[in-house]
Amino acid sequence: MAKLDDQLKAAILRMPVKEKDKLLLRLVAKDAKLVRRLIFELLEGGETRDERAEDLRRLMLKEMPATGVKHLTPGYLLLDLRHWNARINEHVQATKDKVGEVTLVVLLMVEAFRRHYDMLRSFPERRSDTFAPYLVRRLGGILKKAEKLHEDYHIEFRRDLNELLEYVWKFKATAYLAEAEGLPKKWG
């Protein structure tokens, strides 16, 4: 973001309040992330973080493809994971919910394995050549974020995270990548 010149800052501060307000509203409207954050902080009072996370969790579980869906491939499952990761990122940008991010991402990935492990195994390993690296990289990043959280929060995602690690080490396409990434076989 470009830094404003001191003279320009002074000139803006001298502008009439009504004119500054109009400019501010125009600028805010151009930044969707800022709008979402302001809605959360100003309209919702910043107190709906847990409710928003729970709504996202329910929606994610409801709309994720069910077990046995025809025509589902590792590539299509990856598209779905990316979609939900984007929604989780929007939630985190608006609410600054670090615990929710870890919990939701772990749930998303473990639920993908719970529902579609048999489908993933049924394809040749090369069909997971985009799914596996994405999942392992995302898991590595989430593990780093989980380590930074206070240990009292670990109970919220420990069981799912350990189940996810079991799947990652059991699934051949992700196991060798997990080893290269240095992922643990068990967490906490």
Image (cartoon, rainbow, N blue to C red):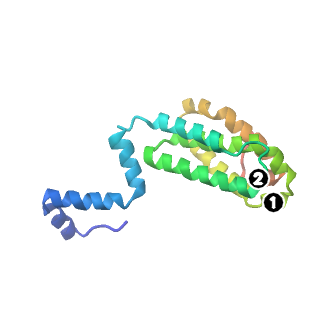
- Percent x, y of residue 70: 79, 50
Residue drawn at x 85%, y 49% is: 121
Q: Which amino acid does label 1 sit on?
A: Arg
Q: Quadrant of the N terminus?
A: bottom left
Residue drawn at x 76%, y 53% is: 72
Q: In which quarter of the image is the C terminus?
A: top right
Q: Distance between the residues labelled 2 and 1?
A: 12 Å
- Percent x, y of residue 68: 79, 44
Considering only vertical position in the picture, is 5 above or below 122? below
Residue 163 appears in the figure: yes
Question: Which one is in front in this view, the residue at disc 2 or the one at disc 1?
Answer: 2
| In-front residue for pair 5/94 | 94
Residue 106 appears in the figure: no
Instruction: Using residue 3 as the reference point, say whether residue 11 is left or right of it.
Output: left
Considering only vertical position in the picture, is 104 above or below 76? above
Query: Which residue is situated farthest in the front direction here?
Result: 70
Callout 2: SS: loop
Residue tagged 1: 127
Dot 1: few (<14), some (14–19), or many (≥20) neighbours within 10 Å?
some
Residue tagged 2: 72
Considering only vertical position in the picture, is 54 above or below 132? above
Instruction: Using residue 158 as the reference point, say whether residue 113 is left or right of it.
Output: right
Earlier in the chain: of badge 2 and badge 1, it is 2
- Percent x, y of residue 67: 77, 42
Residue drawn at x 65%, y 43% is: 108
Q: What residue type is labelled 2?
A: Leu
Dot 2: few (<14), some (14–19), or many (≥20) neighbours within 10 Å?
some
| In-front residue for pair 70/34 | 70
Instruction: Give the quadrant of residue 76.
Output: bottom right
